[in-house]
Amino acid sequence: MEQNIQEMNKRFEAKKREELLQSVPVKFHERVIKALDYEKEEEYDKVEELCLEMLKEQNDKEMEQIKIILARIYPRLLRKDVNNSNQRYQKDLERYYIFLDTIQMNSLMQEYVVETLVRLCELMENPWYRPLFKEFVTHVEKKGYLTEERYQKTIESAYASMESYSYYEDNRISIIAKAALKAGYDRAYTIPEEKVETTRITMEIDALTNDWYICQYYADHKDEFSYIAKEYPHSYSLIKDLVDQVDKNSKKKEEETEEAFMQYVAKGTEKEQLKKLLESSYNGVKAQKEKPQMVHDGASTYHRNTEKIGRNDLCPCGSGKKYKQCCGKEA
């Protein structure tokens, strides 16, 4: 069975290669085959070199497939540059910009630009790379490469993702507000795309929990939210409707949130019981001192939980004592 699948894949690949060769002038066939082989071997810089060379010789409709090869490999080339720290990123990025300015930005080409955004967004765990990614996103937005309405969300998501790395290190923002910002991101970009029902419900419960927290928290911390709106506008825009509703009538929003919550609680649970659970949870979160760490998977931001330390485990500080007799005394 596995052998049959491999043979089918080989035949499909051979057919696609033949179709590609038929779409370009014969004089380029040898170089096209070499470029495809380089792509398979992930030697994207060599693919780029060959494709640019061919386009320089003949840049017309007959070379559309060569442009598609370039659009396809640039996201991988730039990601490889960053991962390998090979000092080629800036040079390859400049060539990518030139390429984007010389092609027709149809739906397919826009999809490849989005792929580039997603692939490079995944690299933001590297603090040194974040300013470079911001430059790229700003360039894509200013140039207006993404004209289709569905891709405007991609730009906003990229900006919000960048901001998340800054506000999670910002001591002027509380854990309550950071959790609300994360919930705002999830509600806008992650929950609508979630296909697993149980995961989606869990995320919706988290979002409702954070809505309820803001109902309790906002009145005494309006300056904090004004600061967030000024410093992190893309992230704040995701919770602005919530903040406006709470500012207008926090009691009404609190009751609406509790009502929405009731569909997820155990059968027979009274609303007062739910409220007590939320109050207890809110007070616990408010008392926390450590801020969560953030990572990015290209689609959404999420908490990375540190490994739990048992009370009878050795203390991680290296004292040789049990955790409960050392650093765990404070816990």
Image (cartoon, grey):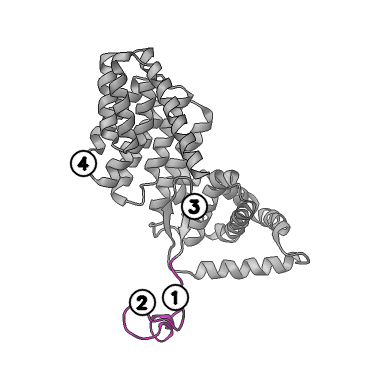
Q: Are marks 2 and 3 in contact (CB under 8 Å)?
A: no
Q: Are marks 2 and 1 in contact (CB under 8 Å)?
A: yes
- Mark 2 surroundings within 10 Å by alpha-carbon count, few (fewer than 14), some (14 through 19), many (20 or more): few
What label does residue 87 carry, if any? 4
The amino acid sitting under disc 1 is Ile
Name the residue carrying label 3: 225
The residue to which callout 2 is attached is 316
Residue 1 location (% of width, % of height): 53, 44
Closer-to-camera residue (10/242): 10
**Which element type, helix, strand or loop, lies under badge 4?**
loop
- Mark 3 or mark 1, earlier in chain: 3
Q: Residues within 10 Å of mark 3 (few under 14, many from 20)?
A: some
Q: Residue furthest left?
A: 87
Q: Is residue 298 left or right of residue 60?
A: right
Q: CA distance from mark 4 to mark 2?
A: 38 Å
Is 152 above or below relative to 32? below
Please tell me whether residue 309 belongs to the stretch shown in magenta.
yes
Front tag of 3 and 1 = 1
Q: Which numbered disc, 2 or 3, marks the residue that appears first in the sequence? A: 3
- Crowding at label 1, few (<14), some or many (≥20) Cα neighbours within 10 Å? few
Q: In 3D space, how far apart are the residues under numbered discs 3 and 1 (Cα atoms)?
A: 34 Å
Q: CA distance from mark 2 to mark 1?
A: 8 Å
Tag shown at residue 309: 1
Span colored in magenta = 306-331
Q: Earlier in the sequence, mark 2 or mark 1?
A: 1
